[in-house]
Image (spheres, rainbow, N blue to C red):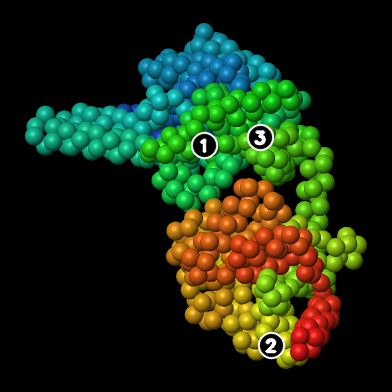
Amino acid sequence: MFYLQSTETVIKFPNIPYFLRIAAYFFFLIALIQKTKSISLRLTNKSNLFNLFVFITFATSISVQFLIAPVMGVSDVSFLIAISIVMYPIISWSILFLIISLFYLSQYSKEKWNLLLVISGFGIMVVADFYMGAQLSIGILQPGYIINLHYTVGLLLIALAGRNSQETTEQFKTKESGNFKNIKIVFPYFIVFLLILFVMNSYNWALNALSSGLTVTFLLIMGRQVLVLKRNRELIKEYQFLAYHDPLTGLGNRTSFKKNLEKMMDATNDEGQSMAMFLMDLDRFKNVNDTLGHVIGDCILEETAKRLKCSLGSHLIYRIGGDEFVILVENVSEQTCIQISQKILASFDKPFVVKHHEIVVTPSIGISMYPSHGDTGDLLLRSADAAMYYAKADGKNKFHFFNTELNQLMTRKVELENELRKGLKQNEISLFYQSKLELHTKKIIGMEALMRWNHPTLGSIAPVEFIPIAEETGQILELGEWAIRTACEQTKEWHDKGFRYLIVSVNVSVRQLEHSDFITMVKEALEDTGLDPEYLELEITESIMKNIVEITDTLYKLRAMGVSTSIDDFGTGYSSLHILKELPIDTIKIDKSFVDDIGGPTSLSMIKTIIEMGKNLKLNVVAEGIEEEYQARILEEYQCDFGQGYLYSKPINSEQFEIYLKNAAESKREEQRYIN
Ligand code: C2E
Ligand code: MG
Ligand code: MG
């Protein structure tokens, strides 16, 4: 342009610099679209691109109508040249549109001031363009005119913004202000409305019923559309709330917990601080839920959430499942964690009053710290979980920090989990047998099959340690099936060897009973081994009460098959008499803890009650864990029929048990001979 201005007196239009400028503007336009996109992911959505195209269409149609057509009508300019004349204002209009959008978005950007520089730069240039356009249309375009200075200032501002721009990735809030959203929705309608007005004006439409009908109908459609969009927005809000909140308590759910945990961990890394995760659950909540019903259970959860919110205020609280709550606290010391835990425990001091029931609810809390107790969200939760279990084992209604000792326990648990997989295949698991006797005759009536795991390097691992792991991982299904088959096979063998009276008791976990194939599995084990079903007894614990409806059905099926059932460790759980009456059960086994403490008044009266109740319900009563002669005597006195314990025999392997059976038979024969 400078060259043209210095060499030619009259500058022809359009000329090369003009096309170059159009090209440059085109690139500006693309750059602005990219910038707008990068600021807000939301802006990549179709509604914004749609708005841009609506705007461009509008600008094009207006320009064609009012610029191209008149220019082509009065002069001999070619269509291409006419288009190129019009291109310039269209691109300028589009740039204007984008800088307005950018202006709205700039408030959410970290680079707000830089963006304002860009916006001002382009703004000045677009104003200059429109001014130039006006001059061009009346035929004045003078070299060195003051308007050229605007371009220089505009470009300088853009360059300055470029220089200031940081090399960081933008972190923008995606939230848009309500005003901006409304403008976005109404914008295309407004443009169409303007077009209608222009059409009316251009074609000299009279203001009659038709034209006003069209306008009113359009306005009505627009109103309806706006209402639909508003409703959609409300639905989206509701959906977003449900996606991230627990509907019962209104607290954040597992999804929002995971999301915020990651964010918090990142922030903690940046600041070099530590954060704490409190995992809390309600002690014996399942029992309350099972005995008093889900409605009351739900009320307790709601009240728990209220009390937590009340005592913790601003900290982040989530309900991540059942009765499990998580609290995340940033920048804390152990001392603050202790204070927070004490606050939580104190908020449960008062009993809950739900539907006229006064219920004492206590929590157990496990605390893990980031990053020392786990550097990922999963590990941190596992650590808090381990600490919470420790708090429960330690007497409940307590809090406990994760520590290295717990770490070792967790490592051992993971080790056992992996080893157990191989254990069964490599014959490391076996069954031991412990005799059951009729107390007053001392006659062996059967035996309990008890699992043993002898690991080549870890040594012998107790069932109390590996059975819960197997239950957790589901391996109990395979292990349990193996135990039933092996016990049936062994008992059949002993029957065939002459010990026909032996009834074998096999322990069964709730997880096995809940499995849909359980009945078929038992049936097949009996058929395959040839053991008569009446010589098999399955021992279940009171935890079946949790799932009483489905399990009752299974118990009836077992009874129909001829297999008997007994309730193990009776008295430690929460079975109610009423439920026991409804269940098809044959035997109850008084828990060892009562027998241990048989001298104490509480245990004795408990034993008396259990025996009496058992007799009333026509159930057999077995006492387990008899170690001393006097315990056996008292039990006999209270008419307990059967007993089991170290006094008679410890659990022993099958070879030893066979010898034990033979010896017992031999001494009975001796006794008989002696009497005769
Ligand atoms: P349980 O069914 O109540 O078995 C009785 C436990 O008490 C056995 O422990 C037995 O060795 C022990 N015991 C018996 N008499 C005495 C005594 O006089 N004094 C003392 N101190 N202890 C006595 P064990 O074998 O360690 O089994 C523990 C628990 O592991 C069992 O308790 C049962 O719940 C579970 N378990 C064992 N084998 C299996 C199995 O095959 N499947 C399932 N699901 N659980 C099993
Ligand atoms: Mg048992
Ligand atoms: Mg027991």
Say which label, 1 or 2, has the lower sequence index. Answer: 1
Residue type, label 2: Arg
Which residue is label 2 attached to?
A: 500
Asked whether residue 276 is in view, the answer is yes
For label 2, the SS is loop
Separation of disc 1 and disc 2 at Cα? 52 Å
Instruction: Please name whichever residue, 167 or 372, is drawn nearer the observer in this view of the structure.
Output: 372
Mark 1 lies on residue: 360
Tell me what residue is drawn at x 40 percent, y 29 percent.
181
Q: Which mark is residue 398?
A: 3
Mark 2 lies within 8 Å of ligand 2 (Cβ measured)? no
Report the front residue among 465 and 21: 465
Using the rendered view, name the quadrant where residue 453 is placed.
Answer: bottom right
Do we see residue 257 in this rendering?
no
Sequence-wise, the earlier of marks 1 and 3 is 1
Amino acid on which disc 3 is placed: Lys
